Image (cartoon, rainbow, N blue to C red):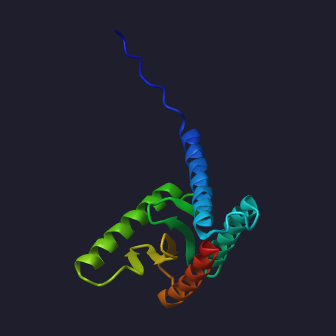
Amino acid sequence: MSVEPKEYQPFSIVTERVVIFKRILLVFNFLIKRFFSGNLFEKPLLLGVDMREKQIEEVLHGLVAASAAMEGAALVTSDGLLISSSLPSHMDEDKISAMVAALLSLSERAVEELDKGSPEQVTVKGSKGYIVLTSAGEEAVLAVITNLSAKLGLVYLDVKNAARKLQEVLAS
């Protein structure tokens, strides 16, 4: 009995399927929220999803454009699924989403163990820049990547305003 090796699909096909799956999850999440809020048929569903997606992209692009020190931004679910991003092409969205989820999980455990409530913001300083994670609602995290020249006070202010806008968009 011979066993033939499995043929693996090229990475680009797998990536496309992941993107399609994420979009399906976004639509499903939108429908569930509409269903439980009682206004399932209030607005055109697909138009609502497209409008929210566009609003999220505008907020992320605006945040990155606000400062030369901002290298990229991503909105990720607490489970590590990418909602939207404004990242340079050399940054892998899936890796960033996974790292955000890992950092969030670790920060949740740390504040729980130390009895400090729930994490609101996480800042990681590296030799070449910063990673700032901020809550954007109950189920989303805004991740911002900056270079080392970033003025953290201004970054925190811009991130706080963007997180508030994203929370409003996600709640609508």
**Is residue 55 left or right of 131 when viewed as pictured?**
right
Q: Which of 15 and 30 is in front in this view?
A: 30
Q: Which of 39 and 163 is in front in this view?
A: 39
Residue 54 in sight from this viewpoint: yes
Name which quarter of the figure residue 51 lies in: bottom right
Q: Is residue 62 above or below residue 79?
A: below
Instruction: Determine whether, in the image, residue 55 is placed left or right of residue 146.
Output: right
Q: Which residue is drawn at 65% across and 74% down?
A: 172
In percent of width and height, residue 79 lies at 44, 61
Query: Residue 140, how many percent across, how many down?
Result: 50, 70
Q: Nearer the viewer, residue 33 or 57?
A: 33
Q: Position of residue 69 (x, y in %)?
A: 56, 79
Res 128 quadrant in image? bottom left
Q: Is residue 54 above or below residue 94?
A: below
Q: Indicate left or right for 103 with 145 as reference.
A: left
Q: Can residue 89 be seen in this view?
A: no
